[in-house]
Image (cartoon, rainbow, N blue to C red):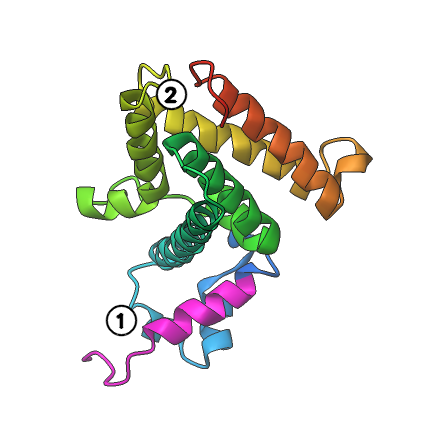
Amino acid sequence: MGRPETNLAPQIRDKTLELLLEKEPEEISTRDIAKACGVTATSLYYYYKDREALFNEIKLECIEKMDKFISEKIKKGMLKQHRQGETPNPLIEARLGLEAFRDWAFSTPRIALLVMGRLKADTQADPEKMKKYYKSTVWGQMVFDRAVQAGLSNSNDTLLDASLCIAALWGAIESVLLNRTIPQYWSKRGGIEFTNKMIDLLLTSLMCGKSA
C-alpha cells in the first residue's frame, strides 16, 4: 500500500495536541488519535512510526513556538531599553529571556507542562535534531559568554549555568502551576512575584557586582 496523496501529518499533530491538552500521554492510544483524525490506526503509520515519534514531533513543534515567543519578547524588551536611552547589556538580555520563558509558561500552562516534562525528548535523535530541543539553552550560553567578556559575569561554565538557570526557573514555574508553593503565589500576580525572585537569585549568583 502506498502513502496517501493527502499529507495528513499537520492535522494529525493538531488533533493529537488537542488530546494531550485533556489527557496524559500514557492515557492516549493510537486508536484514540486515529479516531480524532477520522482515519484508521494503520493510516497513522504512514506518517509516524509509532505514537512516541508523533509525540516527539509535537514536542519539537511546541518548542519552536516557545523559542519564537521568547525571541520576540527579548527583541521588544531590548528595543524598549534603547528607546528609553538605557544601555542594554547581556545580563539585561538574560533577564528578558528568563522572564519571557516564564511568561510563555504562564500563558500556555498545559503545553509548558507537556514540553518540559510529560513529553520526552528523543534520546536517539541526530545532532541537528537535538539542537532544536536546546536552542534556548544555547542562546543563554551565548548571552552569558558575552556577559563574561564584558566583565559582568563570573561564570566559569556558561553552558552549565544557562542550563541550570532554565532548570531552576522551571522548577519555580512548575511549583506555581501545580500549586506546590504556598497559596499566596498561586495567582498570576503571586506567580510572577515568586518567579521574579528566582530570576533575581539566579542572575545575582552570576554577577560581578553589577546590576542585572
How far from the left and from the top, in percent, is residue 23? 60, 57
172 lies left or right of 37: right
Determine whether the residue tagged by mark 1 lies in a helix, strand or loop: loop
**Residue 122 in which image quadrant:** top left
The front one of 116 and 25 is 116
Looking at the picture, does residue 80 appear above or below residue 41? above
Q: Nearer the viewer, mark 1 or mark 2?
A: 2
Q: Amino acid at mark 1?
A: Tyr
Residue at the bottom extreme of this rendering: 5
Looking at the picture, does residue 32 appear above or below residue 198? below
How far from the left and from the top, in percent, is residue 188? 71, 47
63 lies left or right of 111: left
Residue at position x 60%, y 38% in the image? 173
How far from the left and from the top, in percent, is residue 42? 34, 72
Looking at the picture, does residue 22 appear above or below residue 105? below
Looking at the picture, does residue 25 appear above or below residue 207? below
For the record, the magenta segment spans 1-19
| Residue carrying label 1 | 46
Q: Amino acid at mark 2?
A: Leu
101 lies left or right of 162: right
| Residue carrying label 2 | 152
Residue at position x 55%, y 43% in the image? 102
